[in-house]
Image: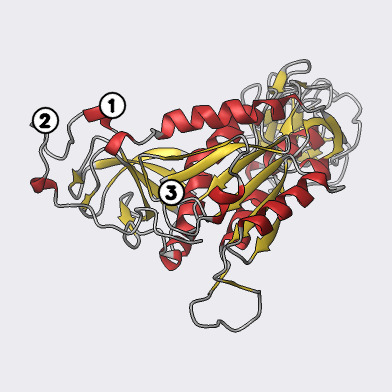
Amino acid sequence: MTHPDSGGAAAAPAEARPHDGRPGHAPAHGQGHAHGHRSVEEHRGRLARLLAPLADRAAQDRSLDAALGTALAADLAAPLSLPPFDNSQMDGFAVCSSDPGTGDGAGPGRRRFTVAEPIPAGAAPPPLRPGHAAPIMTGAMLPAGADAVVRVELAVPAAYPPEGGSVDLPVVEAGTYVRRAGSDVAAGAVVLPAGTALGPAQLGLAAGLGLSMLRVRPPLRAVLVSTGAELAAPGRPLAPGQIHDANGALLRAALRESGVQARAVAVRSDEPAELRGALERLARGAERPDLLITTGGVSKGAFEATKLALDGHDVEFAHLALQPGGPQGLGTFAGLPLIAFPGNPVSCWISWEVLLRPVLSALLGAPPARRRLRAPLAEPLESPAGTLQVRRARLRPDGAVGLVGGPGSHLLGALAASDALVMVPEDVTALAAGDDVEVWLT
């Protein structure tokens, strides 16, 4: 069921709350957790212990194409240097910086050279003879005897004369426009440590090193189970009291974007036996997942199917000092780790971003952790005492962060318009425009 999880209640005015004398700070009762609710940090620790065995799964060898979104299982040492040879950074002429040239006709600060055979990229050039300058293309191997490159634009004429012709070039220092072998990556160096999440840049590096396969940690296989009698089948018109299931699409996309192999199913019922049966079939099936995630049915209502279905199993339910996303469950079902998220869409999203994603990142390396920064608030906000409030926001061009929508757990439109999360600590009840806040870029 998609019952309220405290995400929709507006915070009481900050001035109406007792505090310790610091504006906008709540008293430290029960470690600052409202009503004795479990802290986010403690819950992440429990999630980490529950999911720790997933880090022990056997590594896999995968092609670069199939490795996207996974994490390295072992340190990756470079089998060769990058660049593998000295090469030109520019289209121009390869020269020896100390070569006086042919000694005739050039003006002050310039030297005249005989034009050597051109060097295209991919060729193995002959040594550069004294008094010669070799036309060279960007990325081409520097010939033995050359230690610098002069841009063609600085040549007189500013073109490539035929082999055997003459060209006037300015005096340059050794190393000018030369990419030295190993200046990017030295052979034998660890370029990517174990646990590195593999994105386009990392796979590009592996390809540049001549690798076609990588040893990776296998991606997680997760099944998302949306629950609730109010869920309408996809493509069907809504009957009175029904809603469309956003959670399955939302979380499946979030997981798949993060390298998790995720599929979604829906149990459109509040009958505990139907949910329990669905979970049993998933656990016994040929495609047994590594992780079960349910959404809905974990609050304090009268028809909380998830709580009832998991009664008697090794699953605990708690309320976190978190808004939105307070009601949570975790444990095991038929030997599989199970995480129970609340049913409101934004609560699901925050549960993933704030609770599960950081734990998977720390344990497995994938998904990568969200980038975090400090930014000034564009407007004031209020937050409940003793609760980590997570607000949806957009980072503005001027560097400030503007809130999108309110704190409610049902504001799916505001979530879709956001690109950041603002973290309001448990001991903060009010912030003014211009106050610095922690921001997670999503």
Residue found 66% across the figure and 74% down from its top:
234
Earlier residue among tags 1 and 2: 2
Crowding around mark 3 (Cα neighbors within 10 Å: few <14, some 14 to 19, many 20+) is: many
**The residue tagged with tag 3: helix, strand or loop?**
loop
Crowding around mark 1 (Cα neighbors within 10 Å: few <14, some 14 to 19, many 20+) is: some
**Amino acid type of the residue tagged 2 in the rendering:** Asp
Asked whether residue 345 is in view, the answer is: yes
Q: Quadrant of residue 77?
A: top right
Q: CA distance from mark 2 to mark 3?
A: 27 Å
- The label on residue 105 is none
Residue 9: x and y, percent?
28, 57
From the viewer's side, name the closer residue of 170 and 179.
179
Q: Quadrant of residue 385?
A: top left
Left or right: 434 in relation to 275: left
Residue found 17% across the figure and 48% down from its top:
432
Left or right: 189 in relation to 107: right
**Amino acid type of the residue tagged 3 in the rendering:** Gly
Residue 61, above or below 147: below
Residue at which label 1 appears: 31
From the viewer's side, name the closer residue of 74 and 252.
252
Q: Residue furthest top?
A: 188
From the viewer's side, name the closer residue of 90 and 169.
90
Asked whether residue 253 is in view, the answer is: no
Residue at which label 2 appears: 20
Earlier residue among tags 1 and 3: 1
Residue at which label 3 appears: 325
